[in-house]
Amino acid sequence: MESDSNTVHKGIRKGLYLIPTAFTAANIAMGFLSVLASVRGYQIIDSNPEQAAIYFNYAAKAIGLAILFDTLDGRLARMTKTSTELGVQLDSLADVLTFGIAPVVLAYSWGIGATFNEADSLHNIGVFVLFVYLMCGVLRLARFNLQATRPRVLMEGSQKVDKKNFVGLPIPPAAGLIAAIVHFGPTPISILGENIARFYTISLIVLTASLGLLMVSTLKYTSFKNVGTGRRNFYLILVLGTIGMLIWLYSQYVLLLLAATYVGHGVVWYLMGLLRTRSGTEADASTG
């Protein structure tokens, strides 16, 4: 009987390892579907812009769901203590597709590719910026993996691992901001009129470049890894329930606000730190 019990427990333990992997697979599926929806929308912009907007909205929603699955797979792996080296690498590969390639395809299809002719220099600049975004995202993931697997053998000048904060903007919220913008206004930019379309598309290029730079920066961003591990889970449930209801009722506004707030809070922290350092230096100089 004792051996049978041990066998059952081992079987359950092995089954637990499949749970985070299943969420990672769902993450990959959302990235795949997002790319397909973006490509399909790009194909019919001129002939049926209303249907193209629906496809772009599908693509944006898929990226949003992928962020949820990506958050759950890591949290479940930590809760069940089933984190593996294979899982870390698989998760990063999934993120390259879902939060690297998928938002790049969406931004090109919804804005850059439809607005600018290939002979236009702004088209080439936009493509270059999208490539830079993708490369910055890959570098951000590679740096995260190094810090996770070799926390004490980092290159000189690298940041130490901090469980409360990320170093640099994580790639999921970077992709989430692009998806939230498209979800807020899925109508293809190219049909808004030439001048307005060029302005919005240039703004999209600038935003994408900024997101790439933030990903490879050393700015600190809250990780939320410790959220839900303390004694205030009751309040957390209320907050999550409220946010979930607001997303259900006003998803276009709430998701854009949440994404912009997270992306911007790292910059605000950095500027506040500079102001505190500057005021402290001035105070020391005045007393000295």
Image (cartoon, rainbow, N blue to C red):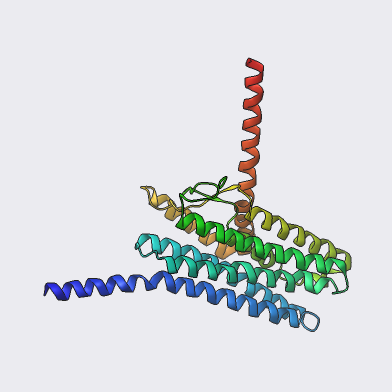
Is 126 situated above or below 167? Answer: below
Q: Position of residue 262 (x, y in %)?
A: 59, 52
Specify the farthest residue to the top: 288
Q: Position of residue 241 (x, y in %)?
A: 47, 58
Is 283 situated above or below 48? Answer: above
Q: Nearer the viewer, residue 74 or 288?
A: 288
Is residue 49 visible in this depiction of the protein? Answer: yes
Q: Position of residue 202 (x, y in %)?
A: 81, 61
Question: Which quadrant holds the C terminus?
Answer: top right
Residue 284, quarter of picture: top right
What is the tally of numbered marks visible in this picture? 0
Question: Which quadrant holds the N terminus?
Answer: bottom left
Q: Position of residue 40 (x, y in %)?
A: 69, 82
Residue 51, quarter of picture: bottom right
Residue at x 53%, y 57% (from the top left corner): 144
Q: Is residue 54 left or right of residue 172?
A: right
Is residue 177 visible in this depiction of the protein? Answer: no
Q: Is residue 89 left or right of residue 37?
A: left
Residue at x 52%, y 72% (from the top left corner): 27
Residue at x 12%, y 72% (from the top left corner): 2
Q: Is residue 9 left or right of residue 53?
A: left
Residue at x 59%, y 58% (from the top left corner): 140
